[in-house]
Amino acid sequence: MNNNSSTNKMRALVIEHQNITPNSFADRATKSLVAELQNRSIEIITATSYEDARAVILSTQIDSLVLALEKTEEQIVNSNEEVELLSALQARQSEVPVFLLAERARTSILNNRQLMERVDECYSVLEDTADFVAGRIVASMRRYRAQVLPPFMKAMMHYNDIHEYSWSA
């Protein structure tokens, strides 16, 4: 990570697949979630293809991955590209929380066992509000950070968040 004021800022990789129809409900719900996360001081990195997302995963530390799906139930059940992407994430940052947003019924996603083994939480863009989902994502990102940071680094980052004094270590 770089040494500027955004060092502490949590990052979410949001993958809005290129097949999402512009101005569809799924598209608007994803944009609303991104805005809600940004309002909570989360740095958003967006990707519109799995190749782009893989490049981000391999080059950048992230604190969560949000995958927006707009697929038929059959495509979800038989999907391999999401599983491959999540395997790449697991190889690089094994404990990063993964969130799935889908317009289709949750039960169709649950039928893809390989996908669900790597997803932490699944939300329906038709049923869950951006505020609720953003709250769940931020809480999960905080738990992730608390789990991976050594105690001294965690204390320094907390101290730095106060912005009262300069420090060095």
Image: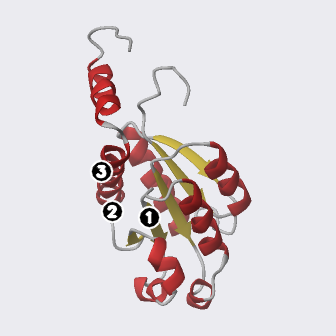
Looking at the rendered structure, the kind of residue marked 2 is Thr
Q: Position of residue 166 (x, y in %)?
A: 34, 8
Residue at numbered disc 2: 129
Residue 150 occupies which quadrant of the picture? Answer: top left
Visible residue check, residue 102 = no
Precedes in sequence: disc 1 or disc 3 = 1
Note whether 41 is above or below 115 in the view shown: above
Total residue callouts: 3
* Nearer to us: label 3 or label 2: 3
Residue at numbered disc 3: 143
Residue sitting at x 59%, y 67%: 87
Looking at the rendered structure, the kind of residue marked 1 is Phe
The reply to whether callout 1 and callout 3 are in contact (CB within 8 Å) is no
Residue at numbered disc 1: 99
Precedes in sequence: disc 1 or disc 2 = 1
Visible residue check, residue 151 = yes
